Amino acid sequence: MRLFRFLTIASILIVMAVGCAKVLDVPTPYIGDRLVIFGVLSPDSIPTVLITRTYPTVGSVTLSGKSIDNATVLLMTNNQAISQLYLVEPGRYQARNRVAFVAGQTYSYSVVAAGYPAVVSNPEPIPSAMQSVSVVMQNAIQSPLNSSYPSRKMVCSFVDDPRTTDFYSLDIEAYGKESLLTVNTFGLDRPDEVEDGCGFRSRGRRHEYNATDVCLRNGIGSMSVGIELRGSTRTGPMRGMQADCQYIIARLRRTNRGYHEFARSFYTESDDPFQAFEPPTVRYTNVTGGYGFVAAYSQTTFVVYP
């Protein structure tokens, strides 16, 4: 009887939803074709920019050929070009070599492509290298996801620069049997689904944890994460096989606000139909003339053996 009632109510709701359907002939705003750029500025990586374009929200849209392959991309500092980026694959531009970035000095990208307004990113200072950084594996803990798997607590500690407003990111990769492993990590500072003013777990990058310096005491910061030490291999001839973790690569970054906001607000799309009723996500941008963002960060990498 209870099942019959549920099916009856569900049928009524479906009929109501179909009966109330109406096509709304309301034009949606479209600012026009614009470039969308995503760039990286970091002393330990080659300058790279990904370029796509905007599309109207409705109407006939062809996504093929969405990459922009005819752009002129320049790395700028003090309004002067110091390096040109070249097309290395569809929509992806890269400098020939690394650039000797100077901490504290500002850099930006200039992008020009036929048929689109020119795009310039805001000048972003390169964050200085972090001081007194340590990453250690501590006591064994129980994973809330796989209680039978061996798991450990990882604690990353660092000293904050009180003269600047800083953002931090901890990214984790586990390796075993000469392969990157698919493992579970879980935040210990706060529940993973909770975002507060102190930090959050990245959307779309489930092994990246973010923090700000507003909650640090006496300039000392720490980030604690639980890590399962068993997972499945992602590459190689033994792909998909279970393996124990042999070592962990932990990357701690001091980032700019653009990196922080990208991790917080992008990759929010899902298959949940109720997402249509949620407030729209405001996407941070530090680009003029188009859309996107440019990340700037300094990075310290650790190899940890559990």
Image (tube, rainbow, N blue to C red):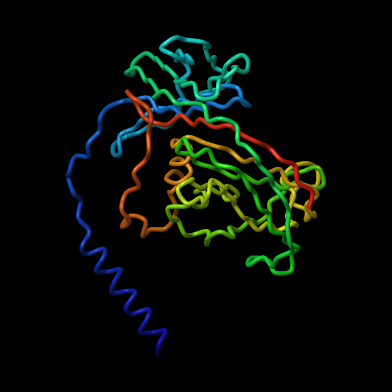
Q: Is residue 304 above or below residue 278?
A: above
Please provide percent x and percent y for residue 257: 44, 37
Query: For this view, does 83 lie left or right of residue 58?
Result: right
The quarter in which the N terminus is drawn is: bottom left
Residue 144 figure quarter: bottom right
Q: Is residue 107 above or below residue 170?
A: above
Q: Residue at x 45, y 48 (%)?
A: 214
Residue 26 figure quarter: top left
Closest to the observer, 36 or 150: 150
Residue 145 figure quarter: bottom right
Q: Residue at x 50, y 24 (%)?
A: 104
Closest to the observer, 289 or 57: 289
Please provide percent x and percent y for residue 132: 65, 40
Count how many numbered circles sit on residues in the image. 0
Q: Residue at x 27, y 27 (%)?
A: 32
Query: For this view, does 258 lie left or right of residue 169?
Result: left
Please provide percent x and percent y for residue 233: 75, 49
Please provide percent x and percent y for residue 96: 61, 14
Q: Is residue 124 above or below residue 271?
A: above
Closest to the observer, 163 or 228: 163
Closest to the observer, 85 or 151: 151
Query: For this view, does 43 lie left or right of residue 15?
Result: right
- Which residue reaches farthest front? 218
Q: Residue at x 30, y 68 (%)?
A: 14
